Image (cartoon, rainbow, N blue to C red):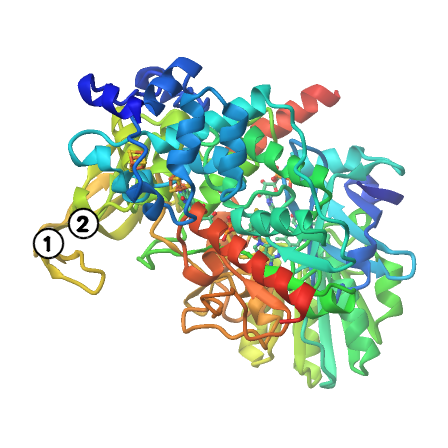
């Protein structure tokens, strides 16, 4: 069993942080990699990115949004409880290099995925500009951590309850207009990554996105996670999860994320009935 | 040889194994053949002529002493029979169920020249099942510990064979498995109705009782590398990671919802038990009109699973004819009995979907057979203008698999052939990297359980020599 040693709730309980004992994974993880977790015998295998690792303590930290049956089940686990299976590190690590000015754009729980990448970008000597977006102030996560690893820092909210009133792309456009940006990293909801990529394409700025298709094994043996990138089918679990944002077929990804909509509803309703 | 004479006078027909009726079993996941009773097994065993130069043994890739074990069944010494089987085959309960006997042992049985061959597979299964149910569970003797450590990567039939062989020789063996459950294709691929998962679990448990350590969730190449294993103190590494890369057709529309690789479909159904959804959390698409592409064992398993999950119609679409279908005869027969339809000499050219990106059908072409190709089978040629549409809301692609580069990419000094399979010495299973052996599907490409086990046994012998003598 992989024991939970720390648990926090964020964004009004819609986002949960778990620090988990996984010594073998903690020592090997690189920014951008993920794990698959399964809570119990009958559980589903679900991918989550490692937001943080502590090789000395032998722990990894995941931060996830509660969106359905499995994440709701994970939410019910307390300190001292554990996951039956944690598999990883999986996926390719982010290619981090010193190139100059970099913009990191995070939306929703994508910010958790973005944090280790942002930190590595900064540590290697880049000038890091961060933009975090959320629907409203209460849904914003990891503000302090992200501020710490950024040279410039911006927040946008859809309703204007905090930071700039607008979308991350509004802020990004201003920055692209006035600065020489070498790279953009955008991680968040698929539509956000799509619109960031459309924008940066106009400015010809290389853009990295992290894709989140549905996965089963995470080792390249099922093809469930297939995405179209530059007219080629790629398996996100082994070829990604990060890809050139300008090449990704986002509409197909959004469509494929709907594969199990009916089943997810059945499963979530059952969960709610059983847990009140 | 008195039995022989008696048999010649009054021939006993091949004893069929009792099985669930097609109309019942097509909607449940219980095992189809129910096994021999002692009486049936002995009646069947009595059909063996105890040949001096048995063709059957030559037909078995691991050379099981078939007349020997069958004779023990005739005598009622079932413990002796299973001991005899174990001499060549660590998992007779599995092979008895899944070997393509018709082209191996039974295909070479002399009795089969004039009538039905001796049901060697059924008898093998009987001995193993009898032992499981009534045996003492006594462990075989193991040699004293050698202090040598062996890492086995992959817990399919070949890896488990290596583990079993080396543990009894006194080595310290750890199996690393990427999935959360050991067994390889035996647990994620072959369905419950053909090979109950409890049997595989029991075989693994047996190895654990012998001292084999099984470490699941260990993706070698990601969680740990082959070089790390040597650094951690392992003296030898066996790679038996199978041929798990799914092949697709690369036709337009293939990424629509409702098109799955057989690997995904079967993994959801078997390993994740999605056929019990929503009692378990992993979903599986339920098709009304299901099309399965391909005609091997994987295709039959997919089609029969789809039928069990409640499909109205399941069609196997295959570009050659029935003679060329690579699946075991028994599987094709069972599938047909369960109402699976065969759309032969047919090749899909395009998937069709609705505005939600969900599959609604496919466009296919009729084929005819031309001259034999490299594989010796007659090449299918499209008939011009023969396009037609079939309705489908679920398509399972079972057109073969390739080598997964996950491990080999991370270990540059293991030589691969041009398809990405590991090159090994055919006599020992040694790879180009010192201290590393490989076998099973990752060397041969998708093959059979018994060949994977045979490769494991050969490598285990070589590993033992290496650990003992240094060569
Ligand atoms: C490589 C990778 C890394 C990820 N990292 C994180 C992370 O750090 N934090 C985090 O909160 N989430 C992350 N995700 C997404 C996370 O895996 C899903 O939110 C989770 O699987 C949902 O499971 P569920 O059973 O709770 O919801 P379900 O009931 O399965 O789904 C509920 C709703 O969520 C959507 N959904 C389903 N699967 C996914 C998915 N894989 N991604 C996004 N939406 C989905 C569906 O549209 C559905 O309507 C990651 C996904 C991938 C592939
Ligand atoms: C659906 C299906 C039906 C079949 N039916 C039959 C049949 O009826 N009769 C027959 O003889 N054969 C059949 N076969 C073929 C047979 O199952 C295979 O030939 C055999 O299982 C190969 O054994 P293996 O040990 O080489 O590999 P596998 O059984 O493929 O096992 C490999 C194991 O290694 C693990 N692994 C992979 N990569 C890594 C890694 N990097 N680190 C750690 N672990 C890893 C995998 O998860 C897997 O558990 C069938 C195959 C399938 C898919
Ligand atoms: S192992 Fe397979 S081929 Fe050999 S005797 Fe048994 S069933 Fe026949
Ligand atoms: S060839 Fe047939 S009859 Fe002869 S020993 Fe083998 S099983 Fe018995
Ligand atoms: S999750 Fe199965 S191939 Fe990526």
Q: Earlier in the sequence, mark 1 or mark 2?
A: 2
Question: On the same chain: label 1 and label 2?
Answer: yes
Q: CA distance from mark 1 to mark 2?
A: 7 Å
- Placement of B357 over or under B425, stated as above or below: above
Q: Residues within 10 Å of mark 2 (few under 14, many from 20)?
A: many
Mark 2, secondary structure of its residue:
loop
Q: Nearer the viewer, residue B234 or B286?
A: B234
Q: Is residue A158 visible?
A: no
User: What residue lies at 66% left-to-right and 35% top-to-bottom?
Assistant: B205
Q: Nearer the viewer, residue B326 or B440?
A: B440
Left or right relative to B447: residue B318: left
Residue A39 occupies quadrant: top right
- Mark 1 vs ligand 2: CB under 8 Å? no
Left or right relative to A55: residue A177: left
Q: Chain of mark 2?
A: B
Left or right relative to B160: residue B440: left
In the image, residue B321 lies at what x, y percent? 16, 45
Mark 1, secondary structure of its residue:
strand
Q: Which residue is mark 2?
A: B320
Image quadrant containing the C terminus of chain B: bottom right
Q: Do labels 1 and 2 touch, CB within 8 Å?
A: yes
- Mark 2 vs ligand 2: CB under 8 Å? no
Q: Nearer the viewer, residue B463 or A178?
A: B463
Q: Is residue B253 visible?
A: yes
- Placement of B74 over or under B391, stated as above or below: above
In the image, residue B89 lies at what x, y percent? 50, 42
User: What residue lies at 65% left-to-right and 37% top-to-bottom?
Assistant: B140
Q: Chain of mark 1?
A: B
Q: Residues within 10 Å of mark 1 (few under 14, many from 20)?
A: some
Q: Which residue is mark 1?
A: B369
Residue B393 occupies quadrant: top left
């Amino acid at each position: 069993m992989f024991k939970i040693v720390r648990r926090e709730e964020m964004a009004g309980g819609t986002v949960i942080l778990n620090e988990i004992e996984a010594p073998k994974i903690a020592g090997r993880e690189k920014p951008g990699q993920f794990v698959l977790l399964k809570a119990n015998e009958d559980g589903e295998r679900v991918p989550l990115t490692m937001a943080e690792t502590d090789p000395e303590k032998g722990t990894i930290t995941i931060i996830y949004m509660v969106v359905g049956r499995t994440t709701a089940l994970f939410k019910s686990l307390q300190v001292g409880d554990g996951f039956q299976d944690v598999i990883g590190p999986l996926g390719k690590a982010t290619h981090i290099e010193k190139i100059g000015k970099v913009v990191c754009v995070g939306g929703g729980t994508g910010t958790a995925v973005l944090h280790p990448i942002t930190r590595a970008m900064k540590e290697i000597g880049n000038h890091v500009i961060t933009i975090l977006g959320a629907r409203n102030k209460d849904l914003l996560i990891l503000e302090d951590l992200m501020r710490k690893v950024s040279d410039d820092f911006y927040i946008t909210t859809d309703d204007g309850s905090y930071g700039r009133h607008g979308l991350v792309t509004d802020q990004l456009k201003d920055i692209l207009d006035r600065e020489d940006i070498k790279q953009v990293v955008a991680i968040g909801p698929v539509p956000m990554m799509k619109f960031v990529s459309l924008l940066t394409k106009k400015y010809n700025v290389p853009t990295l996105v992290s894709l989140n298709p549905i996965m089963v094994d995470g080792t390249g043996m099922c093809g469930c996670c297939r995405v179209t990138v530059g007219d080629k089918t790629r398996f996100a679990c082994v070829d990604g999860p990060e890809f050139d944002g300008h090449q990704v077929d986002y509409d197909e990804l959004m469509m494929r994320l709907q594969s199990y909509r009916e089943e997810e509803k059945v499963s979530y309703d059952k969960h709610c009935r059983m847990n009140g | 040889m008195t039995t022989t004479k008696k048999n010649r006078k009054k021939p006993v027909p091949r004893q069929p194994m009792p099985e669930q009726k097609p109309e019942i079993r097509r909607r449940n996941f219980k095992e189809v053949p129910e096994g021999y009773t002692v009486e049936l097994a002995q009646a069947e065993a009595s059909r063996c002529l105890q040949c001096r130069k048995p063709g059957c043994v030559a037909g078995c890739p691991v050379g099981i002493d078939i007349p020997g074990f069958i004779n023990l069944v005739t005598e009622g010494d079932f413990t002796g029979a299973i001991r005899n089987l174990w001499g060549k085959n660590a998992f007779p309960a599995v092979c008895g169920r899944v070997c393509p006997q018709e082209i191996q042992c039974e295909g070479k049985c002399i009795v089969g020249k004039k009538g039905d061959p001796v049901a060697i597979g059924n008898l093998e299964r009987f001995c193993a099942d009898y032992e499981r149910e009534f045996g003492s569970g006594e462990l075989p003797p193991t040699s004293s510990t050698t202090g040598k450590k062996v890492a086995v990567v992959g817990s399919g039939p070949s890896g488990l064979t290596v583990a079993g062989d080396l543990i009894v020789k006194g080595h310290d063996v750890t199996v690393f498995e990427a999935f959360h459950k050991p067994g390889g294709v035996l647990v994620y691929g072959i369905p419950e109705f053909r090979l109950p998962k409890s049997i595989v679990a029991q075989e693994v448990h047996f190895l654990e009782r012998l001292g084999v350590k099984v470490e699941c969730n260990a993706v070698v190449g990601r969680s740990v590398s082959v070089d790390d294993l040597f650094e951690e103190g392992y003296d030898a590494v066996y790679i038996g990671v199978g041929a798990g890369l799914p092949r697709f057709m690369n036709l337009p529309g293939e990424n629509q919802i409702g098109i799955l690789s057989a690997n995904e479909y079967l993994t959801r159904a078997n390993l994740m038990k999605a056929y019990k959804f929503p009692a378990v959390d992993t979903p599986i698409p339920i098709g009304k009109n299901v099309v399965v592409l391909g005609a091997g064992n994987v295709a039959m398993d997919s089609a029969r699973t789809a039928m069990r999950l409640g499909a109205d119609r399941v069609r196997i679409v295959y570009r050659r004819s029935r003679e060329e279908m690579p699946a075991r005869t028994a599987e094709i027969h069972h599938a047909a009995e369960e109402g699976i339809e065969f759309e032969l000499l047919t090749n899909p050219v395009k998937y069709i979907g609705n505005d939600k990106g969900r599959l609604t059908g496919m466009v296919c072409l009729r084929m005819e057979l031309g001259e034999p190709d490299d594989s010796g089978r007659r090449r299918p040629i499209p008939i011009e203008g023969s396009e037609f549409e079939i309705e489908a809301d679920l398509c399972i692609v079972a057109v073969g698999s390739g080598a997964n580069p996950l491990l080999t990419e991370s270990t540059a000094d293991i030589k691969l052939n041009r398809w990405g399979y590991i090159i090994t010495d055919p006599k020992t299973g040694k790879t180009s990297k010192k201290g590393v052996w490989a076998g099973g599907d990752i060397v041969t490409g998708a093959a059979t359980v018994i060949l994977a086990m045979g490769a494991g046994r050969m490598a285990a012998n070589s590993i033992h020599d290496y650990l003992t003598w240094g060569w």
